[in-house]
Structure formats: C-alpha cells, structure tokens
Amino acid sequence: MKISYKKLWVMLIEREIPKSTLRKDIELSPGTMSKLNKNEDVALSVLLRICDYLNCDIGDICEAVRTGKK
C-alpha cells in the first residue's frame, strides 16, 4: 500500500491556502514538504500538526491506496 496526500492538496485549494503558507505556518522543513509532494511517508507527528493547523482529522488529509499487490 502507498499513502496519498491528494486530500490535503484539495483541502488547501478549497481553503485558498498556498503550500508555502502551510509550510511556513507549521514550520515544515523543505525535505518534509518534498516528501508530501511525492506521496512519501512522513512522521505521524507532522500529519498531526497539519491536522491541528487545518482543524481536521487525519483521514481528511491522507489515505492509504492499494498498489495492486495482494
């Protein structure tokens, strides 16, 4: 399985929050932001900070996506 942050990007667009603003406001490192953009794993603590900032649940910003393997 892979992780997808598509829900996060859609939420940011809907709320008119640029990615750069999110990064600055919750003090994400450029490397972490790059991982989010590439749908790579990031620390749970980072996801919780994003949820706190956006006042949402973790399922509102990411989801597990099956890769086709059983």
Image (cartoon, rainbow, N blue to C red):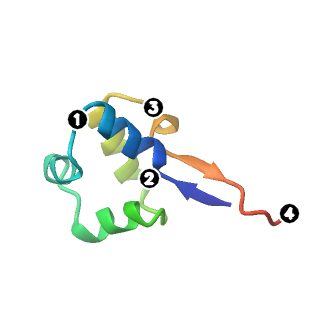
Marks 2 and 1: in contact by CB < 8 Å?
Answer: no
* Mark 1 or mark 2: whose residue is earlier in sequence: 1
Q: Residue at x 33, y 68 (%)?
A: 34
Given this view, does label 3 or label 4 mark the residue nearer the observer?
4
Distance from label 1 to label 3 (Cα)? 19 Å
Q: Nearer the viewer, residue 70 or 17?
A: 17
Query: Mark 3 near mark 4, Cβ–Cβ under 8 Å?
Result: no
Query: Which quadrant of the figure contains the N terminus?
Result: bottom right
Residues marked 2 and 3 touching at CB (< 8 Å): no
Of helix, strand and loop, which one carries label 2? helix
Can you tell which quarter of the image residue 20 is in?
bottom left
Of discs 1 and 3, which sits in the foreground? 1
The earlier-in-sequence mark between 2 and 3 is 2
What residue is shown with label 4? 70
Q: Earlier in the sequence, mark 4 or mark 1?
A: 1
Residue 33 in the image, given as x and y percentages of width and height: 30, 62
Query: In the image, what residue occupies the spot 47% across and 38% down?
Result: 58
Which residue bears the numbered disc 1?
16
Give how far across and how far down residue 18 sits, in percent.
Answer: 20, 46
User: In whole angstroms, how far apart are the C-alphas of marks 4 and 2?
Assistant: 25 Å
- C-alpha span from label 3 to label 4: 28 Å
Q: Which residue is mark 3?
A: 57
Question: Callout 3: 10 Å neighbours few (<14), some, many (20+)?
Answer: few
- Amino acid type of the residue that numbered disc 2 sits on in the rendered structure: Leu
Dot 1 or dot 3, earlier in sequence: 1
What's the distance in space between the residues labelled 1 and 2, CA to CA?
Answer: 24 Å
Q: Nearer the viewer, mark 4 or mark 1?
A: 1
Mark 1, mark 2: which one is toward the viewer?
1
18 lies above or below 14: below
Q: Is residue 55 left or right of residue 22?
A: right
Q: Residue at x 20, y 48 (%)?
A: 26
